[in-house]
């Protein structure tokens, strides 16, 4: 399992590093060429000291620091707040049901990432419009952008978090939580409840995938035993049979459709 997780996050981390570095270089290039003293100005943080003033925009250096901080937390954020958990669990169940080592872990993770991006596209678009774009234009501060960015994610998680899990973590919390509606719940309750709900849903879907292939294994083993071919491993017969059935029913399209539709309810 540890080797599988390491192979999963290697392409994710490399892709995020490349994307963030390119964006940071593109943003820093105009500031570096505008004036010889731009490097000194970029160290400063603009703060309004007038009465009732608010914190201004962060310098390029601090924005880079924030980007790399988010980068270090990106794998955890990807797991905790998106549809990635359910998708990778179901794909792993499928590979176990087929009793093959193919497709490799990198392919499964890549497919899970693209499906996650497809499913989360409306949420990411809302975050971009409400938080990232106004922050780049200087209309809101970084703190306000963070608050606006977490709101769509919380809405997504609350939609798929089960009430039972929400109540469980509210009871387990060491601090008193007062919330008139689910949207008022803190993230330290919503995120673990969402993850637990996704684990349950992923295992339920994986079980439905696993059972038909188990039946095929049992039927093949019974036939071989009745023919007196006890020395022949059942997997030699059942493996190509399972792969053939999966291909004939267009299993990949059915699986992807089921995964995407499970997030459209």
Image (tube, helix red, strand yellow):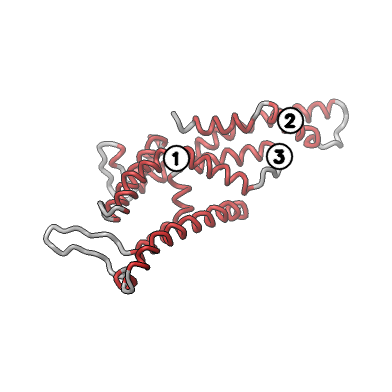
Q: Which mark is residue 83?
A: none
* Residue designated by label 3: 99
Is residue 208 among what the camera can see? no
> In the image, is residue 104 above or below residue 35?
above
Left/right of residue 230 with respect to residue 51 in the rendered view: right
Contact (Cβ within 8 Å) of mark 3 with mark 1: no
Q: Which residue is mark 1?
A: 120
In the picture, the quarter occupied by the C terminus is top left
- Choose the circle earlier in sequence order: 1 or 2: 1
The percent coordinates of residue 229 (x first, y second) are: 87, 31
Residue 175 x/y as whole percent: 29, 50
* Above or below: residue 150 compared with residue 98: below
Residue bearing the label numbered 2: 244
Q: Residues within 10 Å of mark 1 (few under 14, many from 20)?
A: some
Chain-order first, disc 3 or disc 2: 3
Give whichever of discs 3 and 1 has the lower sequence position: 3
In space, the residues marked 1 and 2 are separated at their CA atoms by: 33 Å
Q: Residue 103: name its quadrant.
A: top right
Q: Nearer the viewer, residue 200 or 172?
A: 200
Secondary structure at numbered mark 1? helix
Q: Quadrant of residue 58?
A: bottom left
Tell me the residue at 69%/30% (across/down).
247
Q: Tell me if residue 249 can be seen.
A: yes
Disc 3 from disc 2: Cα separation: 13 Å
Q: Residue at x 45, y 47 (%)?
A: 80
Give the residue at x 28% y 41%: 184
Of marks 1 and 2, the one in the foreground: 1
| Mark toward the viewer: 3 or 1 | 1
Q: Nearer the viewer, mark 3 or mark 2?
A: 2
Instruction: Kindly state the secondary structure of the residue where label 3 is placed.
Output: loop
Residue 191: x and y in percent read 40, 45
């Amino acid at each position: 399992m540890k080797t599988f997780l390491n192979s999963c996050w290697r392409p994710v981390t490399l892709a995020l590093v490349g994307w963030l570095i390119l964006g940071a270089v593109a943003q820093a290039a105009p500031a570096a060429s505008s004036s010889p003293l731009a490097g000194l100005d970029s160290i400063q943080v603009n703060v309004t000291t007038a009465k009732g003033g608010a914190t201004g925009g962060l310098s390029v250096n601090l924005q880079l620091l924030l980007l790399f901080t988010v980068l270090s937390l990106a794998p955890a954020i990807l797991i905790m707040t998106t549809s990635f958990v359910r998708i990778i669990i179901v794909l792993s169940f499928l590979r176990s049901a087929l009793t093959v080592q193919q497709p490799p872990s990198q392919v499964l993770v890549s497919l899970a990432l693209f499906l996650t991006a497809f499913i989360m596209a409306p949420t990411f678009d809302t975050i971009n419009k409400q938080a990232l774009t106004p922050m780049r234009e200087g209309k809101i501060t970084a703190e306000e952008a963070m608050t606006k960015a977490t709101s769509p994610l919380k809405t997504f998680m609350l939609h798929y978090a089960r009430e039972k899990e929400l109540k469980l973590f509210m009871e387990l919390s060491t601090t008193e939580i007062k919330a008139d509606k689910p949207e008022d719940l803190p993230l330290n309750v919503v995120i673990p409840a969402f993850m637990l709900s996704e684990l349950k849903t992923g295992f339920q879907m994986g079980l439905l995938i696993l059972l038909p292939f188990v039946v095929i294994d049992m039927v093949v083993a019974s036939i071989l035993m009745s023919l007196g071919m006890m020395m022949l491993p059942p997997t030699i017969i059942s493996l190509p049979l399972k792969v053939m059935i999966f291909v004939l029913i267009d299993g990949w399209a059915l699986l992807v459709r089921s995964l995407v539709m499970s997030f459209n309810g």
